[in-house]
Structure formats: structure tokens, C-alpha cells
Image (cartoon, rainbow, N blue to C red):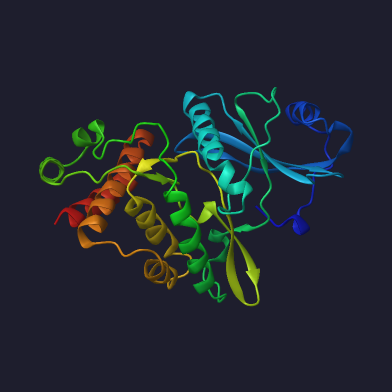
Amino acid sequence: MNPASALTTDRAPLPRRLREIADRLGLAPHVRGWRSMADGRSNHGRTEVFVLAFDVEPGLVAVKCAGDSPASRAAVDRERAALAALAPAAERGEVPVPRMFAAADIPADVLVLTFIEGEPYERFLGSALDPASLAQDLAAALPRIWAHPPLDVPAPPRVPARLIGALDAGIAARLRSWEASTPAAPATAFLHGDLRPANILVRREKGALRLAGLVDFALARPGDTADDQLVLESTTAPVQRDFPALAAAALPPLAPAARRAATIGLLCRLLDDAVRSRDWEAFRRGERNLAEALG
């Protein structure tokens, strides 16, 4: 999301759904504009994100609306549960995550959240701004999230069943052997589940990047912290080449076995997504990477 200072609200009439949300917040007379921030498809279905601007407190709110698919509605439910669990820590300023507005009659397929002023880290491709402070900020915030009791939802299987049938037979056999011989790490941490640069909001400060907040907890789940850390390291390298090493140095070190298990688990999830979306080009690339990780 853009900083509030850069937000330009649409002059078009307020959509009915946003008007209803403003009414239910008791702020309909104070709407000064709105803006669509995102509208697209992801692994958890179609969602729309808007910003509503008011001329009184809270000023700006983010409104996330689920689409019609069960996956999209389930993702909103998962994010609601995650943010509710983190709410006490967020109120104390211990974790930089959005807080929910709890008007009783907000529809179940809608989240109304505090607006975090920041820009997605993915926008800083090749930036010369120093990422060391961002790595330190994440190293402070993530362990506080991980330490929360894990969400009461099923952890995803390490090897999705439909993936085995899609893989090359030799790779599938090696994957089965790895799964049988490698005990699963205890799923005792509260994971964000999708620590990509798009979900890491940053701000610029004296030539450096600082953490503004973490958003999109639609894939939050129980698991091992290595899973979150591996996603963070692997997806931020294209943005700033030095960042993964800085993050790895700031966060608790990953043992080689934990890093390998997290890598294989991540590749299996990505391959399963490719099978689901029938993206066979991405599948073949991921299959080669999985073969390399299995050794």
C-alpha cells in the first residue's frame, strides 16, 4: 500500500459495498474518498482490497473483500482468526500487524483493518537504500509472532497427494523416500505462511529501509519457523541481492537439515499450486529444483 500522504482517492461514487461498511462503522457522513488497492487472483482465490478515507478518526481503513469462491472466503476466515490471535500483541505495539475493526454487523466475508502506511518491499527492486535495518526489524518482529500459540488449523501435508501423481516417477520415488526417512518438525510456531516481499510493508528513513508492517495472513498456519524464514530468504533475493544474507544473519540460524526440509516443503507447495493452476511451465521448473534439493 502507498503511504497515506501519497493516497489519491477516487472521485467516483462510493460503491454500495463500501457505503454499507461505512454505515456499519457509523462513519458514513465522514467519507471523503476511496481507492481500490488490489484486485486479482492468488493461491487463495480472488480478493479485493480498498482503502476508505474519513475526515475523522481512524482516517484511513483497509477493507478486504472475499470473492465468491470457497477458497477466497476460507482465506478471509483464516486471516480473521490470525489477526484476532495477534490482536493483544498488536494493541501493545509488539507486532506490526493490522488491527481489525469489530463492528458486530460487518459481513463475514469482509475484513476492516487499520491502514498501515508503507510500501510493499517488492517495489524496491534493485534499490540502493540500505536493507540492514529492515533485516534487524524483521528479526525483532518475527520471533514475537512465531512465539504465539499456533493457530488451531491443520498443518498442510508435507507432500500433497496429487503432487506425487504429477511428478516424474523417479523424482516421486525419491520424494517418498525422503518423507519416510525424515521426521516432520513439530508444528509449534505461529507462521505468517506467505512472507513474500508483497506482504512486507516498508518505509524509507534516512537512506535506509525500515519495517512498517506485515500484512496478508490468509495463509497463516502452524509449523516450524524454518518454513517462514526460507520463504523470506528465497523471495527477497530478487529485490535486493544482499537482503537474504542480512536476514539469515539476524534471525536464529537454520541447521542444514532444517533448511533442506523447509526447501523441499516449499517446493512441494509451489509445485502443488502449479498443478492446481495447470501452470506446467512453472511445474517443470519447480520439478527440476525439487530434484536438485532431494540430491
In the foreground, 271 or 60: 60
- Against 250, residue 281 (above or below) is above
- Against 229, residue 48 (above or below) is above
- Farthest right residue in view: 29
Left or right position of 1 against 85: right
Quarter the C terminus occupies? bottom left
**Residue 278 pos. (x, y %):** 35, 36
Q: In which quarter of the image is residue 283?
A: top left
- Against 129, residue 295 (above or below) is above
The residue under the point 86% across, 44% down is: 56
Res. 281 visible in picture: no
Left or right position of 83 against 271: right
Q: Quadrant of residue 88?
A: top right
In the foreground, 62 or 222: 222
**Residue 48 pos. (x, y %):** 62, 36
In the foreground, 165 or 152: 152
**Residue 262 pos. (x, y %):** 28, 52
Give the total of numbered labels.
Answer: 0
Res. 85 visible in picture: yes
Left or right position of 235 against 29: left
**Residue 193 pos. (x, y %):** 42, 45
The residue under the point 58% across, 69% down is: 209
